[in-house]
Image (cartoon, rainbow, N blue to C red):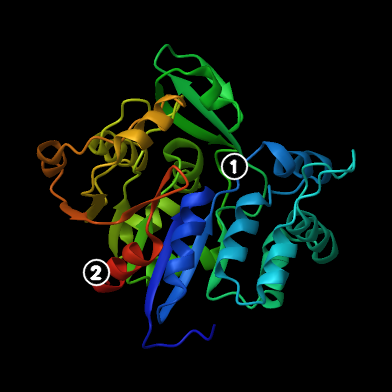
Amino acid sequence: MERTKHRKKIVIIGGGTGLSTLLRGLKKFPLDITAIVTVADDGGSSGRLRDDYDIPPPGDVRNVLAALSDVEPLVEEMFQYRFSKSEELNGHSLGNLMLTALTSITGDFANAISEMSRVLKVHGKVLPAANQIVTLHAQFEDQQIVSGESKIPSYGKKIEKVFISPSDVKPLPETINTIREADIIAIGPGSLYTSILPNLLVEGIKEAIICSKAKKVYICNLMTQAGETSDYTAYDHVHALIDHVGENFLDAVLISNEEIPENVQYLYKKEKASPVKIDIEQLETLNLEVVKKDISIVHSGAVRHDAMKVAEWLVEYA
């Protein structure tokens, strides 16, 4: 999509399903979109390719490219196709393999993303939080430290903080410039400690966010996640962001005002997940705008953000 001066510049930071879902809504609006995507994943196909080819994990980037693409549905389906009948290819998606091949051909992960964006006619820009492999670590309340994004939730312990290595990894200069020039910066939705915070831990990104004149909003998760944010309230989510960044950098938090049906809650209870409690009074102590909107939908027993409704609000807010 052509980037023009009259379009509002919006930067979305995160990873996982939440980010991709939101972007599918945002691309329908006349916005200058940039997605900054985590590269901390180390599980599944992404983890295998990361280890075998010494490249940043392509999975989250692949999903974002697909979400922002403007190609025939069959082409997107092919890009997302996951192999299942071959021992060597089992679990790999075609898009992951293509990004790996392009990284080898161009010699650079960011260049591979740029070339794939052109092929898929991507609306806006997709940037990795870092252009090299990073490892995510978590320190629990009992001071135990666990390394590896995919391993962290399996311990079921309360997380005190997360950090990355190498600690001095740098973002692309384009990422910093884009953040500085943004009109609005949206963080989330997505896994708090394993999809969102790894982006903010890259040296230079959180500093750029703090200095940016953009409006900064956190799109709060609808449900807690077992082993990661069990029993977390909306305030707990926001406080974790502020604690890791080092100062209160947010202007607003967007939360859902809808009750989640009992039968759906029951399904999530089996996964040790529950609705995020909205503690308005606690949030207001942080001196940020608390926005409650009808932004959730239930589909096939799963609660998701309504991409169009969230996108519409972000456009109004920008």
Q: Percent position (x, y) of residue 24?
A: 49, 66
Which is more N-terminal, label 1 or label 2? 1
Looking at the rendered image, the quarter that the C terminus falls into is bottom left
Label 1 residue SS: loop
State whether residue 116 appears in this view: no
Disc marking residue 192: none
* Quarter holding residue 52: top right
Query: What residue does disc 2 label?
Result: 317
Q: Amino acid at mark 1?
A: Ala
Q: Is residue 184 left or right of residue 140?
A: left
Q: Residue at x 23, y 35 (%)?
A: 277
Q: Residue at x 71, y 38 (%)?
A: 44
Disc marking residue 40: 1
How far is the residue under mark 2 from the one under mark 1? 30 Å
Q: Percent position (x, y) of residue 92?
A: 78, 47
Going by the picture, which residue comes out furthest to the top? 142
Q: Nearer the viewer, mark 2 or mark 1?
A: 2
* Quarter holding residue 31: bottom left
Label 2 residue SS: helix
Q: Residues within 10 Å of mark 2 (few under 14, many from 20)?
A: few
Q: Residue at x 22, y 55 (%)?
A: 252
Q: Is residue 84 left or right of residue 292?
A: right
Q: Amino acid at mark 2?
A: Tyr
Q: Is residue 156 left or right of residue 110?
A: left
